[in-house]
Every structure is written in C-alpha cells, then in structure tokens.
Amino acid sequence: MKPSKKTKFWIIYHVGLLFFSLLAAMIIKSVQYHDAFHPTALASFFTIFILCISLGYLTIYLVNHSKKYSHKELRKKIIPGLLIFHIAAFIIANIAITLGSAGWYFFTGESFQGFWNHLLHQELSFGNARLLIWLLFFTLAFFFVLWQKSAKKEQQLREENLRFQYRTLKSQVNPHFLFNSLNTLSELVYSDAKKADNYIQKLSQIYRYIIENETNDLVPLKKELAFVDKYFALQKERDNGKIELHSTIFETDQYQVIPVSVQMLIENALKHNAASMDKPLIIELNIENEVICVKNNIQRKSTMQESTGTGLKNLKERVHLILNKTMTYKEEHNQFVVFLPLKMTNNEHSDH
C-alpha cells in the first residue's frame, strides 16, 4: 500500500530537518572551534533538531489555526500573535539548547559542576544574540506570509463569489420578461402567425446568446448591441409607442463589453420607470472615451417599491473584477445616466 501524500510530506519534512540540523551543527562548530566534527557537535545537532521540530509544529499549528479567521479578524490578532510567537520561539530555543547541553554532559559522564558556566558563556551567549535576530527575522517573515495568504484567500473567496453572482446573472434574463414574452406570444399565435414565428425566433436567439456567453467575461460590443436590439424589439411588441431606444453607436469593432451588461441597464430602466403613449420612456446609447453611456428620462413608477440598487451594485463589481475599471452613474436634469466601461480590442489604444 502506497503512503498517502500527507504521510510522504511528514516523512520528507522530518528527514529534511535531520539533514538541516546536522549541517547547521557542523557550521556552528566550525565557527566556534574551527572544527566541524567537534565532540559537542552532536549536542548541537540534537538541540537544533528539537528546536526546528518544535518551531515547525508551532508554525503548522498557527497556520491551521489562522484559517478560521477572516482577513479582518486576523488583522486584529496579528500583532499580539507576532509577539507571543516570538517569545514562545525564544523560550523553546533556550530550552532546546539547555536540554542539548545537559544531554551531552550526561552522555559523556562529565561533571555537571561546569555545566551552567559552559551553558551561559558558551552555548547561550553564542546563540542568544544571533538567535534573537534570526527568530525576529523568521517571525516577521512568517507572519507576513500568513498575512498575505489570508488576504489572497479572502480576495479569492470574494472573486469566486462575484463570479458566481456573475454566472447567475448571465444565466437568466428577468423572469418577468420571459413571463410577459410568453403572454405576448400567446396573443400573437391567434392574431398573426407570421409575427408569432418571428417573435419565437428572436426569443430563442436571446437565450442562445446568454447560453453561448455564460462562461465569457467579454464579448464584442457589436454582438451585445445586436442582442439588445432583439431584446428591445420583443419589449416593443407589448409596449410599442411607449418605449423608444435611440443609439448613436456606429463604430463597434474596436470595443469589447461584459455580456448582458448593456441589456441589464436597459432592463433596469424599463423596470423602474413608467411609460405611456403621452410620456414615452426614451433610452439613449452612445460612446464617450471608451465608455458606453446608457441614458433614460426619469419617470418613476408611483406604485413601485424603493429600489435596493442590487443590480447596479453587482454590475459595478463585475466591471471592477473583469476590467479593473469603475462603472459610475448619476441623476441630472431629470435623466439617469450610467457610464459602463468598455475594453479596446486594439492594444495600442487601450492605454490612452
């Protein structure tokens, strides 16, 4: 039976520490006595091995313990943890040195009369100054890595959550739209079969676009606007004369956009505003400085509940995640305007 990955890790970990401890002991004795194989090298070897094992287990424990804290919680605990770890490591190191020296005296049968003098003036005095520096360096490095790991983990969780929200949003057009479309279709089937067939074709194209781009972060702007045209055409079947869409976008080949984003902004305008033959809802599309502007006149529905702004907030986070840009929106002169960033397909212009 082959050992598991975990078992292999612990075997390699302990064997590696044995070799490291042996090499470190030889280097220390070379500095102390100019003899890598000085008789006290054995004591140093066991001392370093005990120290490494203890600090290693302490480090692994803290890494595993830190996983239950968020980055925000870890930020509060990092300074006390750093101090406690450094003090604990220093105490462990001195205990290891003391035990190693005592073991050597016991093993060789030397008198313990000179033990404390040797320990204080040879082992601890030589080790403590350097030990403090190395422990401080190791402690700071360890907690910096722990901090970075925590921040990266939180960012990954946040991005995974946003991507999940993104996939969820892309996987569906407002259920009300589908419900209304089916109602409209049921009426057309009896009144105009040819028109009903055309309606079905556009509806299938809308959902095909959503499915095809479910895993895409960006699509050509030309494809998104064609999708928007089909979507709006179906809306006009029910609200013809009450809603209008005006676009002054003609150059689209050099731009990419987040799929379903422009449609979502148009749907947002339709959802939050009233429309009538006397006061139609007018939505305008244009491009300014690598940003597509979606503008509509404000005609809030009197019976509508207060908006939570969740849709715009989610789209804003998607834009930041995918394009590393900021989507903004404002109200002015009785108009609501959203500025949705685009991506240039031509790299030469993307930095301008």
Image (tube, rainbow, N blue to C red):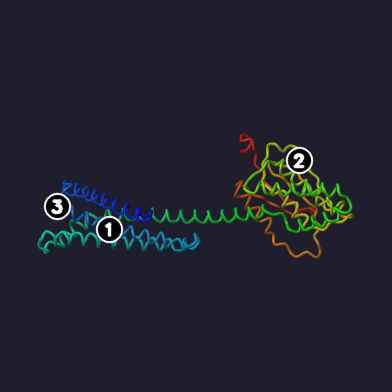
Residue under the point 76% across and 38% down? 250
Q: Quadrant of the N terminus?
A: bottom left
In front of the other: 16 or 280: 16
| Badge 1 density bin: few <14, some 14–19, many ≥20, Cα 10 Å | many
Residue highlighted by disc 3: 39
State the CA–CA distance, disc 2 to disc 3: 85 Å
Q: Which mark is residue 142?
A: none
Q: Circle 1 sits in a helix, a strand or a loop, which is it? A: helix
State the CA–CA distance, disc 2 to disc 1: 69 Å
Q: Which mark is residue 51?
A: 1
Q: Circle 3 sits in a helix, a strand or a loop, which is it? A: loop
Say which amino acid is labelled 1: Leu
State the CA–CA distance, disc 3 to disc 1: 20 Å
Q: Position of residue 58 (x, y in %)?
A: 35, 61
Of mark 3 and mark 1, the one earlier in the sequence is 3
Q: Circle 2 sits in a helix, a strand or a loop, which is it? A: loop
Residue 208, visible in the rendered structure:
yes
